[in-house]
Image: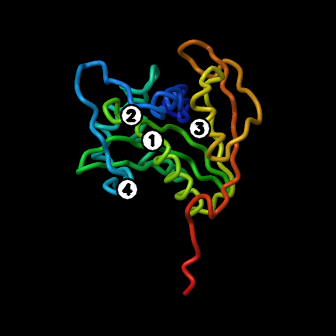
Amino acid sequence: MSDTKKHAVHAGSLESIGDVIQEKPEACGSGEQQTVIQPESLVFRSMQLEDVPVICQIEQEAFTSPWTAEAFINELTNNHFARYMVMEWEGQAIGYGGMWTIMDEAHITNIAVRIGYRGQGLGERLLRELQRTAVFFGSARMTLEVRVSNEIAQNLYRKLGFEPSGVRPGYYSDNGEDALIMWAELDQVKAGVEDDED
């Protein structure tokens, strides 16, 4: 099994979502003022191959064990279970998320927001959009892994209906930390999917 295949749900998955979702905006560390995003100006669309270079930049910002360009290309071209989306603002990719939809289950693989746009609830918006997309593709449940030490992320996931269901020992390759497995039932109303009956 190749490294790309072996780490298709990568060891850094969701490791920094607690940084992505913060109660208060924090400085980017470079002295720059944070860009404030109006939610209605966001665009969510399917990831394309031409997005891979900028997505890899976001990966590098967000994860200690980032995916390679080859891993994303493999997901987009060879994995028919994979669903990846880009969150755009003014034509620029500022975040992305991915999942596998298999039968009636969705498994979040990764999600990240660019450093300069964090602290505004954009990661939560992205995760909600993934939930809606999962329902569209027939998923009734969603799962993800999160570091056992990442209480900020766990609190967000609980807010979105996720509950702990077990632990994967030594899941994160950078420091051997355990992952908490969480599951959510995808209530169609919560996921924002409504019947189009007139």
Q: Name which residue type carries label 1.
A: Gly
The picture places residue 93, in percent across and down from the top left corner, at 30, 44
Q: Name which residue type carries label 2.
A: Arg
CA neighbours of label 2 inside 10 A, class few (<14), some (14 to 19), many (20+) = many
Label 1 sits on a secondary structure element that is loop
**Residue wearing tag 3:** 156
Q: CA distance from mark 2 to mark 1?
A: 7 Å
Label 3 sits on a secondary structure element that is helix
Q: CA distance from mark 4 to mark 1?
A: 18 Å
Task: Give the quarter of the figure containing the C terminus.
Answer: bottom right
Q: Residue at x 56, y 66 (%)?
A: 193
Q: Name which residue type carries label 3.
A: Leu
Label 2 sits on a secondary structure element that is loop
The picture places residue 7, in percent across and down from the top left corner, at 54, 30
Q: Residue at x 68, y 52 (%)?
A: 141
Label 4 sits on a secondary structure element that is strand
* Picture quadrant of residue 54: top left
Q: Name which residue type carries label 4.
A: Arg
- Front position among marks 4 and 1: 1
**Residue wearing tag 2:** 118
**Residue wearing tag 4:** 45
- Front position among marks 2 and 4: 2
**128 or 58: nearer the viewer:** 128
The picture places residue 60, in percent across and down from the top left corner, at 36, 25
**76 or 44: nearer the viewer:** 44
Q: Residue at x 45, y 32 (%)?
A: 20
Task: Give the quarter of the figure containing the N terminus.
Answer: top right
Q: Residue at x 57, y 42 (%)?
A: 108
**Residue wearing tag 1:** 121
Q: Is residue 98 above or below residue 188?
A: above
Q: Is residue 165 above or below residue 105?
A: above
